[in-house]
Image (tube, rainbow, N blue to C red):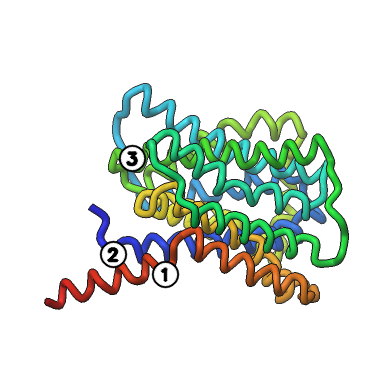
């Protein structure tokens, strides 16, 4: 049984994860000037894997073939395909297009989870989705540019949402088995790295260790590897375990908002009035989709019962 305090921790974990992941676009943008995308992705997950090995030695023990296949599927979809498809999509479509398209992820997760677990999608979920997507659209096209369709890139962007949905379902099933969340995440990383190596070889991605040794590049890589990979995947897997796949994925709506804030703070980009309105719509959508007011009332009522 999930108690209110666990829900609070779950929401905090999801919020932390999206906060960090929202900042990675800025960090990666800086590194892409000198490094290949596959090189950055592979190195950051290797660093994350090593960090998890040091943080929690040991393993989850022997598992059956079906469970091992789930770990492999989670690694393939949540690590390898998720990042590579996003990178390839950006080569054929605009970043603003991608932000809007990927924002349908919570809806796809919600529909998939409702089919698997035979749960009815509530009206507030759909209303919140429409509000959030409207906000993300305003944020992504705050400069006044228009949405233009790019078949290959936009389809690749939509596939990012699909593979993340598969990862969410697979990781949620693994979480139910009660594995230590660090050991579980580390095993997923192992398969993600394994599946990514052929792509790195195909792209001839040979690390330039002299450039990586430069302080700024090294710090950004460590941030991406430790904070954005190791720690964030742990907190995300914990959030999915506590909140479930539908509620945890609602936090993805806030990712473009966070990216904009970091762009303003670090890259000195200007926050337009349209983007500001978009941020308000996005936050409102998250609150409505997750029935934030209802959850707060439930926690308050639960505390009152305990005091009695």
Q: Is residue 242 left or right of residue 162?
A: left
Q: Nearer the viewer, residue 273 or 243?
A: 273
At x 37%, y 22%, the residue is: 65
Q: Is residue 140 left or right of residue 237?
A: right
Residue that carries the numbered disc 3 in the rendered image? 59
Query: Please, what secondary structure does the residue beneath circle 3 have?
Result: loop
Q: Is residue 53 visible?
A: no
Q: Decide which of tag 1 and tag 2 comes sooner along the chain.
A: 2
Find residue 93 and report its horizontal and vertical position in percent.
82, 45
Compared across the picture, whether 83 is left or right of 95 comes to: left
- Camera-nearest label, 3 or 2: 2
Screen quadrant of the C terminus: bottom left
Residue 69 in the image: x percent, y percent? 43, 26
- Residue 298 lies left or right of residue 35; in this view the side is left
Tell me the residue at 70%/47% (across/down). 101
| Residue linked to disc 2 | 4
- The relative height of residue 49 versus residue 266 in the rendered view (above or below) is above
Furthest residue toward front: 123
Q: Residues within 10 Å of mark 1 (few under 14, many from 20)?
A: few
Q: How far apart, in angstroms, are the residues tagged by discs 3 and 1?
A: 40 Å
- The residue furthest top is 65
User: Which residue corresponds to mark 1?
Assistant: 293
Local secondary structure at mark 2: helix
**Label 3 neighbourhood size at 10 Å, few (<14), some (14-19), many (20+)?**
some
Residue appearing at x 69%, y 68% in the figure: 278
Task: Find residue 280 and report its horizontal and vertical position in percent.
Answer: 63, 72
Residue shown at 60%/57% (left/top)?
A: 224
């Amino acid at each position: 049984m999930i108690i209110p305090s666990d829900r609070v921790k779950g929401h905090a974990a999801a919020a932390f994860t999206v906060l960090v992941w929202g900042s990675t676009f800025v960090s990666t943008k800086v590194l892409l000037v000198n490094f290949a995308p596959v090189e950055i992705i592979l190195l950051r997950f290797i660093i994350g894997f090593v960090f998890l090995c040091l943080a929690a030695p040991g393993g989850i023990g022997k598992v059956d073939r079906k469970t091992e296949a789930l770990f492999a599927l989670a690694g393939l979809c949540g690590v390898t395909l998720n990042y590579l498809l996003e990178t390839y999509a950006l080569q054929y479509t605009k970043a603003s297009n991608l932000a809007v398209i990927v924002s349908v992820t919570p809806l796809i997760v919600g529909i998939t989870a409702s089919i698997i677990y035979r749960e009815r999608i509530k009206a507030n979920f759909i209303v919140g989705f429409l509000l959030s997507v409207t906000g993300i659209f305003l944020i992504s096209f705050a400069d006044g540019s228009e949405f233009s369709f790019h078949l290959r890139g936009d389809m690749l962007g939509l596939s990012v949402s699909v593979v993340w949905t598969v990862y969410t379902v697979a990781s949620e099933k693994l979480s139910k088995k009660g594995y230590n969340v660090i050991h579980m995440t580390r095993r997923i990383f192992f398969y993600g790295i394994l599946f990514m190596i052929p792509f790195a070889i195909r792209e001839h991605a040979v690390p330039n260790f002299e450039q990586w040794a430069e302080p700024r590049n090294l710090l950004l890589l460590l941030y991406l590897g430790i904070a954005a990979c190791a720690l964030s995947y742990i907190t995300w897997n914990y959030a999915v375990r506590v909140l479930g796949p539908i509620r945890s994925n609602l936090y993805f709506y806030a990712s473009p908002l966070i990216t904009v804030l970091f762009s303003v703070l670090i890259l000195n980009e200007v926050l337009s009035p349209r983007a500001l309105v978009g941020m308000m719509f996005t936050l409102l959508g998250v609150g409505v989709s997750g029935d934030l007011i209802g959850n707060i009332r439930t926690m308050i009522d639960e505390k009152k019962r305990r005091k009695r």
